[in-house]
């Protein structure tokens, strides 16, 4: 945090000189009184970065001082050259090249407490580092013809800086002095589903939470989900969290409807309050009970390939036919094929020394090993002949022991055929609780989540992803395909668009200042491009349109919904924010749910009051292109990284710092802290307490919990 009387500083975000983009960025420099320059505070490292220099010869000069004689590190060209002086515990200078030391000295120390002008030079085939008018360390440049790509300067904590000057290959000199930082607005998202896992909340507790947010410089609170309390979405039946349902009901008794209760608490403290609405999340995959189980019969709300799904809204349970539908040819192939008679497994690498076993289950639970043995067709291929009338659910596992590996792209890994030799359409299950208990001869009480990506021991995201069959990572195989995208309504239906608009109207009536429409959702599939072939689509495009044509058609339907939502917001004097994804490579390429999300049109038509970038980095994918477009149209940009996935790991500090640097680098206007439950928990009185990752709150907001 900044000490009293100090001024935060920043560097120019972007400058273009002679066709070369110069960029310098840093964090947490604080001005030192009495003309002492700028200092890197405790527990921080200032980091300057200039990409794409493109010149062979250049000079960097730094006027610096350090009371302990610790010098900076200067890196050229991403491990091509490395100049360093005064590393902690190693007060010497060195010139490295390709990770090897080219020259060093034990006498070139950085004088403690003295201001020095440090020069690092690459010129005429020579590398030099030293003080101006002082000792110099020199080495031969091993690759003098190669242009310098990047420049990085790392300043250790406690170092003071007065000026930095960079010259390069005929480029006019760039002198940099820190200037005041542009303020980044902080907001926070409360995913109240997660907040109720640990306990119940009271009105007093919510008020205290809002007080903390206000003290921390938060100006806006966002809230999900928007489902009413009595909706089936909140009817949680997670076996691993038996108390969750009770927490939800106790919170309902304490505060009533969640959305208006939080809106009232936020407004009472001068905070903006926005609902985050997810049109494509009416049900969640992987929340199924085994087929034929008593739990499934009692709590199941939607059928699925994995078993009856209990986590679904009342609306989608009443209108399951309005979801994105699978291609009719796939459904016909499923209906025409018989049971699996022969299974062929192919490995891209030789399979010598690998032993596989095949298991089966009637209801995606209680898997038992089938009495069939694999026959090697060649060094890469194994064949299983199944008994007559095998169960629908299969699992391929690797036996304990042996050598070698068995894996391939999923679409090549397993092929199934019926007794007449016809291909049997199947779906993969890569997510399950199966563990090394397989060695004991039976699967535990768990089910596969079929056609669910981005999870499990391995993280495949499409049929072209590679999957290794391991002892503790079996491959589930289900005969058939999902006829619908589980929780994603199809925007081609007027009924769907009306439902979405009614939900948005509900948010406005609950007291929200606006709605942030978030496309990102938890639906998963290995075959996105095979969905969206609903009756209105086929009636408009013919019986067998291409996935690209369907994608465009659905994109136009979704944009039509946004226009109506814009009108609804204007009529209610509310605001409409739109989420933008780093996966939007272009409006014409596949996105999740096989819908072309035409982000450029949305901006140009004025559909978005603000844009929310759902990404770890504002520089990911086409985010910079989106940011430039938004800036040209005067649309503020908020970056919403998934901080839950960044905090707590070994690289947390580096990841969060780079995320914060990227906010400056790409001119973001706001940082949305996602999500509240990563930093706060609830105590036995229904009031907020410091959560598991509370220590990062100060890094993100400047305020200690």
Image (cartoon, helix red, strand yellow):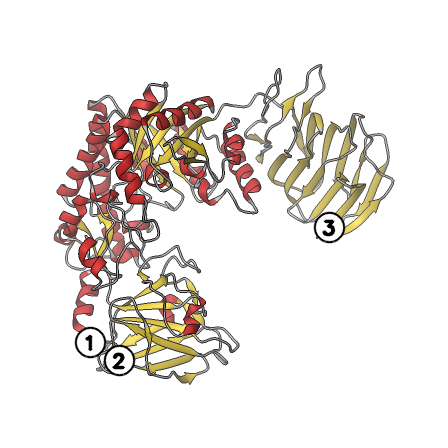
425 is higher (above) or lower (below) than 492: below
Residue pointed to by mark 2: 341
Residue pointed to by mark 1: 338
Residue 635 pos. (x, y %): 37, 27
Q: Is residue 675 visible?
A: no
Q: For this rendering, which residue is in front, 371 or 700?
A: 371
Within 10 Å of the Cα at label 3, are there few (<14), some (14-19), or many (20+) other Cα atoms?
Answer: some
**Image point 44% across, 60% down: which residue?**
457
Element type at mark 2: loop
Tally of numbered discs: 3
Sooner in the amino-acid sequence: mark 2 or mark 3 = 3
Residues at circles 1 and 2 in contact by the CB criterion of under 8 Å: yes
Distance CA(mark 2)–CA(mark 3): 61 Å
Residue pointed to by mark 3: 97
Q: For this rendering, which residue is in front, 356 or 371?
A: 371
Element type at mark 3: strand
Q: Is residue 89 left or right of residue 155?
A: right
Distance CA(mark 1)–CA(mark 2): 8 Å
């Amino acid at each position: 945090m900044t000490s009293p009387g100090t001024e935060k500083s920043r560097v120019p975000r972007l400058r273009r000189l002679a066709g070369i983009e110069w960029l310098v960025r840093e964090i947490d420099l604080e001005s030192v009184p009495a003309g002492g320059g700028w200092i890197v505070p405790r527990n921080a490292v200032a980091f300057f970065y200039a990409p794409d220099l493109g010149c062979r010869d250049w000079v960097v000069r730094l006027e610096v001082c350090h009371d302990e004689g610790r010098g900076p590190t200067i890196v050229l060209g991403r491990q091509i050259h490395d100049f360093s002086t005064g590393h902690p515990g190693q007060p010497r200078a060195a010139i490295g090249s390709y990770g090897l030391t080219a020259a060093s000295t034990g006498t070139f120390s950085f004088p403690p407490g003295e201001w020095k002008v440090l020069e690092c030079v690459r010129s005429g085939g020579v590398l030099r580092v030293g003080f101006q008018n002082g000792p110099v360390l020199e080495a031969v440049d091993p690759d003098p013809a190669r242009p310098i790509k990047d420049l990085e300067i790392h300043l250790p904590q406690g170092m003071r800086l007065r000026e930095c000057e960079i010259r390069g290959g005929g480029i006019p000199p760039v002198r940099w002095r820190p200037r005041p930082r542009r303020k980044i607005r902080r907001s926070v998202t409360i995913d109240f589903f997660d907040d109720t896992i640990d306990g119940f909340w009271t009105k007093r507790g919510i008020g205290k939470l809002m007080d903390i947010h206000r003290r921390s410089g938060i100006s806006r609170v966002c809230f999900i989900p928007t489902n009413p309390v009595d909706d089936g979405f909140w009817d949680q039946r997670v076996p691993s969290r038996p108390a969750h349902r009770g927490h939800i009901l106790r919170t309902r008794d304490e505060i009533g409807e969640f959305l208006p209760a939080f809106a009232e608490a936020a407004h009472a403290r001068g905070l903006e309050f926005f609902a985050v609405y997810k049109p494509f999340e009416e049900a969640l995959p992987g929340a199924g009970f085994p087929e034929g189980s008593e739990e499934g019969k009692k709590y199941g709300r939607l059928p699925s390939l994995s078993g009856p799904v209990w986590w679904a809204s009342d609306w989608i349970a009443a209108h399951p036919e309005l979801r994105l539908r699978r291609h009719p040819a796939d459904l016909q192939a499923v209906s025409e094929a018989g049971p699996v008679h022969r299974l062929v497994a192919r490995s891209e690498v030789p399979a010598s020394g690998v032993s596989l076993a095949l298991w089966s289950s009637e209801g995606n639970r209680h898997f038992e090993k089938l009495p069939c043995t694999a026959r090697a067709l060649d060094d890469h291929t194994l064949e299983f002949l199944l008994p007559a009338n095998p169960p629908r659910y299969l699992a391929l596992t690797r036996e304990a022991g042996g050598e070698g590996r068995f894996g391939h792209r999923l679409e090549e890994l397993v092929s199934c055929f019926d007794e007449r030799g016809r291909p049997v359409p199947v779906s993969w299950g890569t997510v399950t609780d199966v563990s090394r208990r397989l060695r004991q001869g039976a699967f535990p009480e768990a089910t596969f989540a079929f056609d669910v990506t981005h999870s499990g021991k391995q993280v495949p995201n499409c049929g072209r992803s590679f999957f290794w069959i391991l002892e503790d990572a079996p491959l589930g195989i289900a005969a058939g395909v999902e006829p619908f995208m589980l929780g994603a309504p199809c925007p081609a239906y007027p009924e769907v668009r009306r439902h979405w608009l009614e939900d948005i109207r509900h948010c406005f009536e609950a007291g929200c200042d606006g709605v942030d429409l978030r496309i990102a959702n938890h639906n998963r599939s290995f075959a996105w491009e095979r969905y969206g072939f609903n009756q209105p689509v086929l009636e408009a495009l013919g019986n067998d349109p291409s996935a690209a044509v369907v994608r465009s058609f659905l994109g136009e339907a979704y944009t039509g919904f946004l226009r109506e939502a814009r009108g609804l917001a204007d009529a209610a004097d509310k605001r409409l924010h739109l989420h933008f994804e780093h996966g939007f490579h272009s409006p014409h390429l596949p996105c999740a749910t096989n819908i072309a999300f035409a982000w450029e049109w949305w901006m140009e038509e004025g559909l978005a009051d603000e844009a929310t970038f759902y990404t770890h980095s504002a520089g990911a994918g086409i985010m910079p292109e989106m940011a430039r477009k938004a800036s040209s149209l005067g649309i503020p940009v908020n970056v919403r990284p998934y901080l839950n996935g960044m905090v707590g790991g070994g690289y947390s500090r580096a990841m969060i710092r780079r995320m914060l640097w990227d906010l400056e680098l790409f001119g973001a206007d706001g940082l949305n802290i996602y999500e509240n439950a990563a930093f706060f928990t609830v105590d036995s009185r229904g009031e907020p307490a410091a959560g598991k990752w509370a220590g990062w709150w100060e890094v993100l907001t400047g305020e200690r919990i």
